Amino acid sequence: MIKSKRNQPDTLSEMLALDDIIARIKSLRVPGDALTWHRFSGSLLLVLLVLLFLSGAFMSFYYSPAPGIAYDSVDYALYSLPFGDVIKGVHYYSWNVLLVVMGLHLARAFVVGAYKSPRQLVWVSGVMIMLLIPASIITGDLLPWDQDGFWTTQVRISIIASVPFVGDLIVRLVQGGSLTGIVALTRFYVLHILFLPLFLVFLVVIHFHFLRQRGLSASWDKEHSNRQTISFFPQFVNRWLLLFLTVTAVLGLISWYWPAPLGDPADPTDSTFVPRPEWWVLFLNQLVTVFKGSLTLIGSIIIPGGLVALLIALPFLDTSSDRRPASRKKVMLFAGIIAIIWVGLSIMGYVQHFNGTHS
Ligand code: HEM
């Protein structure tokens, strides 16, 4: 009896084994170059994700997901609430910058061959994260219930509806019927603030789990050599916090001087309104323009879907152990051609939609 009493934890800290957890965190070590100038994109992505979650949480105190009222609540937060413009701006600029940084992160991992064994699953989990970000942006675009968000959503819904067999079903599931109204707004809101963020956090944890298990890539000729390490806490955490504070200050200042845009309130009867595509979908928009009529599916589903499938399969197709770009000429050339087509289509889309020839 006495023995079992002695085994029981005395304090809350013992009960939660906090000392144990703290000791474990203190003993963690990460590679010395885990956050350096040439390897900052992953940590920066994490900073931006945290900023998105924080600013989103603040905005949800004021936002009402009902057509009409939604617009007024965003308008109030943006123009009347102290620092409301900064919070909305940080949310807006964070996802824009996140897309650019994610592109750089992917490009770096591709060029240095970091997707190769043993990091195939780090890469695959990264591609999964990459697919989730557009879903978050698409659901977020409708929330302010302004003309741009409403009509951009109509374009996207018509593209989804054109997918054979499942298109109509997906549209009905996401917007609860054929029209974009209160049910659609509620579903987009719940997806945006609950399900997609939960899934995103889950995938980021998986990404980090595989990173920890498989390790960061070293330079090509030093893969197996001993590298310097730093403590996770406080050395790495301090660096990350410095990055976090700097990015928060920069995005906060930008939001202060150039507030996030909010158009006119949505008017579902005004079918003459032509929304401008966001910069990150310009290439997709052009693809849909190039493949018109009966070929629509090629531009909207087959080519983008094929590229995603290729990205996922990359570590299992390119299996040579040599990571040097010069030894991967075919893969580099193929990626270069895709990148040129991508940029070319985006420029064409920009000229068409933003340079006076908007039709
Ligand atoms: C929000 C999304 C993401 C976060 C927070 C994130 C975070 C990180 C971090 C902190 C690192 C280690 C440091 C670094 O190399 O920068 C890393 C490495 C890596 N990430 Fe991501 N990542 C994300 C998205 C992606 C995407 C979209 C891909 C590619 C499809 C990807 C593929 C990789 C690979 C292959 C590595 C290993 C790099 C190496 O060992 O040199 N990640 N990620």
Image: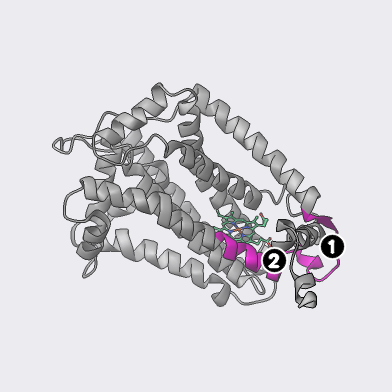
| Residue at the image point whose x is 63% and y is 49% from the top | 41
Quarter location, residue 14: bottom right
Q: In terms of depth relative to the viewer, which is nearer, 24 or 308?
A: 24
The residue beneath circle 2 is: 212
Query: Where in the figure is residue 82, as x and y percent of width and height?
Result: 48, 22
| Residue at the image point whose x is 66% and y is 74% from the top | 117
Residue 258, numbered label: none
Query: Where in the figure is residue 335, as x and y percent of width and height?
Result: 53, 61
Query: Where in the figure is residue 60, as x and y percent of width and height?
Result: 42, 40
Q: Secondary structure at mark 2?
A: helix
Counting residues from the start of the chain, the first of labels 2 and 1 encountered is 2
Residue 258 appears in the picture as rendered: yes
Which quadrant of the rendered structure holds the N terminus?
Answer: bottom right
The residue beneath circle 1 is: 227
| Residue at the image point whose x is 56% and y is 29% from the top | 252
Identify residue type, mark 2. Arg
Ligand 1 sits in which quadrant?
A: bottom right
Is residue 20 left or right of 53 when viewed as pictured?
right
Q: Is residue 309 above or below residue 197?
A: below
Structural crowding at the residue carrying mark 1, measured as other residues with C-alpha within 10 Å and reported as few (<14), some (14–19) or many (≥20): few
Quarter location, residue 21: bottom right
Which quadrant of the rendered structure holds the C terminus?
Answer: top left
Q: Secondary structure at mark 1?
A: loop
Q: In terms of depth relative to the viewer, which is nearer, 134 or 358?
A: 134
Residue 357 appears in the picture as rendered: no
Q: How much space separates mark 2 and mark 1, taking CA atoms?
A: 15 Å
Identify residue type, mark 1. Arg
| Residue at the image point whose x is 57% and y is 46% from the top | 50
Residue 122 belongs to the span the image colors magenta:
no
Q: Which residues are magenta?
A: 204-232
